[in-house]
Image (spheres, rainbow, N blue to C red):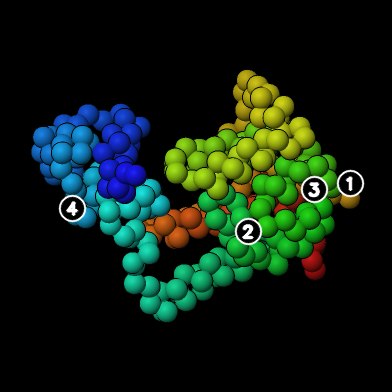
Amino acid sequence: MNRPQDAFGPLLKSWRNRRHVSQLDLAMDAGMSQRHISFLETGRSSPSRYAVRQICEALEMPAAEQDVMLVSAGFAPRSSTASWSADVRAAVDISIDHVLAGHEPYPAVSIDRIWNLQKANEGALAFFAVAGGTGQPNLLRDVFSPGRLRNNIRNWSEVTRALFRLLDLEVARRPHDEDGKNLLEDLKSLPGVADAIAERPQEHPAPVLSIEFLIDGTELKLFSLIATVGMSMDANLDDLRIETLLPANEQTRQWFASFRS
């Protein structure tokens, strides 16, 4: 059996190739010699924890992938050793709750990197219930699966293609994300999804894709904004997303104004 650190060299070379940088360029960005980078890739040298960190930052790797690199070099992952105080955890939770509540009456949710629902404001819970959501923990499964929610999205094929592409990019960003890869395959196997993502996009698409709902005879158009935790150095925080839906026209704005009044 290979030792964990035997995998570091191939992983390093793989990420360097993904970023399209030479050993010399990486060495300069990481503050090392090209010779040392070469020795690390071939296994002739073992990296220190500090060297792994410098290389990961130079390659702009996601926090979770940095943990993979640390483990491959024989070190504990940084995310598991980070000392989170109760105050910091509470501050993050309170901040997320503040954003969700402040977005009322429009829908807002907290999700992870593959759209598993973590939290939702009252506007989101009420709207998705009316729109036909089934309450599945994964929002992409809810949108992609046959049912009332899918039927109520007038431009479902276009939305599906865009969402699938976003997930595909997220998985490409983290090549060791097996959960993401499995979700991609599961979603693609759902009825109609493969055909939707294979459709050619419009020649002149709108600058922002709106999700077009038909709710009780009323046409609603919403677009999304997604926020992340800035400068996160922890894989768990790096996973967090806050997605907010906003009205794309006055009719939608007025509908939400009266929706729960």
Residue 155 visible in the picture: no
Camera-side mark, 1 or 2:
2
Residue at x 55%, y 55% (from the top left corner): 112
**Residue farthest to the front?**
1
Q: Is residue 10 left or right of residue 139?
A: left
**Residue 247 visible in the current orientation:** yes
Please tell me the numbered disc located at residue 178: none
The residue depicted at 15 percent of the width and 38 percent of the height is 44
Amino acid type assigned to the residue bearing label 1 in the image: Gly
Tag in front: 1 or 4: 4
Q: What quarter of the picture does the C terminus occupy?
A: bottom right
Nearer the N terminus, badge 1 or badge 4? 4
**Circles 3 and 1 in contact, beta carbons < 8 Å:** no
Q: Amino acid at mark 4?
A: Ser
Q: Nearer the viewer, residue 52 or 2?
A: 2
Tag 1 residue: 217
Q: Position of 65 compared to 203: left or right? A: left
Query: For the residues marked 3 and 1, what is the alpha-carbon distance in whole angstroms?
Result: 14 Å
Q: Circles 3 and 2: CB distance less than 8 Å?
A: no
Q: Residue at x 57, y 35 (%)?
A: 165
Earlier in the chain: of badge 2 and badge 4, it is: 4
The amino acid type of the residue labelled 2 equals: Leu
Residue 25 position by quadrant: top left
Q: Which residue is mark 3?
A: 149
> Which quarter of the rendered picture does the N terminus lie within?
top left
